[in-house]
Image (cartoon, grey):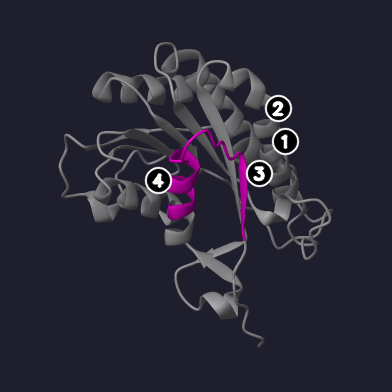
Amino acid sequence: MKDKVVFISGSARGLGASLAEYFYHDNANVFCASRSGEKPKSLENTDPKRVSSGTLDICDYPSCEQAISQCLSIFGRIDILINNASGFFGRKKIGDYSPVELRSEIETTLLGAINLTNVFVERAALEEINQHIIFISSTSGLSREGGNELFPVYAAAKAGIIRFAECINASTREKGIYSHTLIPSNIREANLAYEAAVSRSDVFQAIKFLIEPSHNLYVDQIVLNPARVQKP
């Protein structure tokens, strides 16, 4: 990852913050984009030449344009765009959502990734080659995946992410931009078997595999499921 420039949306906390930390310690340059505009706490005292941050509201197209432009002005290019930011208004059956929750979930989880990708392909990818777009989806978005009665809108948005990435694949590859989709199950940091989960480190290692394939291999999707599940 040495000298690669990685743009991560939703990186002030959670998975995005962990990915920013992993990439930094793997010698990449990292732009942390989030609503707060703050760096992850774990990266507050790191090399300012290698870690920067900016405000990003992925539901707002001009904000996406500004964040991409800011990253380009600081680092000169973007090698890897990670569409990590997501909303979550789960644990409700359909009919129990408010109109605001419905709109916010779709705009944050699906439209936000589409906004940012469109700006990236238009602006950041004009002269570079071998760039990558990483979409973070979920097994909730897979067809016939059970257990989503309380997550219907989230699941629909994550399914949209998978399909959008598939649809842009051919056109972006013509420009030397490779789109990939990670489809993890639950993501946790502890009690992985009991939670039927994978770790944030697993997600990072999967991203590295996607962007560093050998020979003439291109991988468009990876589903991450736990190897072991502990029965309650």
Q: Nearer the viewer, mark 4 or mark 2?
A: 2
**Residue 60, image x, y percentages:** 53, 26
Secondary structure found at label 1: helix
Give residue 163's mark. Answer: 1
Q: Amino acid at mark 2?
A: Cys
Residue, disc 3: 105
**Residue 113, image x, y percentages:** 57, 33
Q: In what quadrant of the picture does the N terminus appear?
A: top left
Q: Quadrant of residue 99?
A: top right
Q: Nearer the viewer, mark 4 or mark 3?
A: 4
Q: Give the class, few, some or many, for how many residues have Cα within 10 Å of label 1's Cα (few <14, many ≥20).
A: some
Q: Amino acid at mark 1?
A: Arg
Q: Nearer the viewer, mark 1 or mark 3?
A: 1
Whether residue 59 can be seen here: no
Residue, disc 2: 167
Whether residue 127 can be seen here: yes
Secondary structure found at label 4: loop
State whether residue 123 is above or below residue 196: above
Q: Give the class, few, some or many, for how many residues have Cα within 10 Å of label 3's Cα (few <14, many ≥20).
A: many
The answer to whether residue 211 is magenta is yes
Range of magenta residues: 205-224
What's the distance in space between the residues labelled 4 and 2, CA to CA?
A: 26 Å
**Mark 1 and 2 residues: CB-CB less than 8 Å, in contact?**
yes
Q: Nearer the viewer, mark 2 or mark 3?
A: 2
Sequence order check, earlier mark of 4 and 3: 4
The residue at the point 80 percent across, 63 percent down is: 146
Residue, disc 4: 11
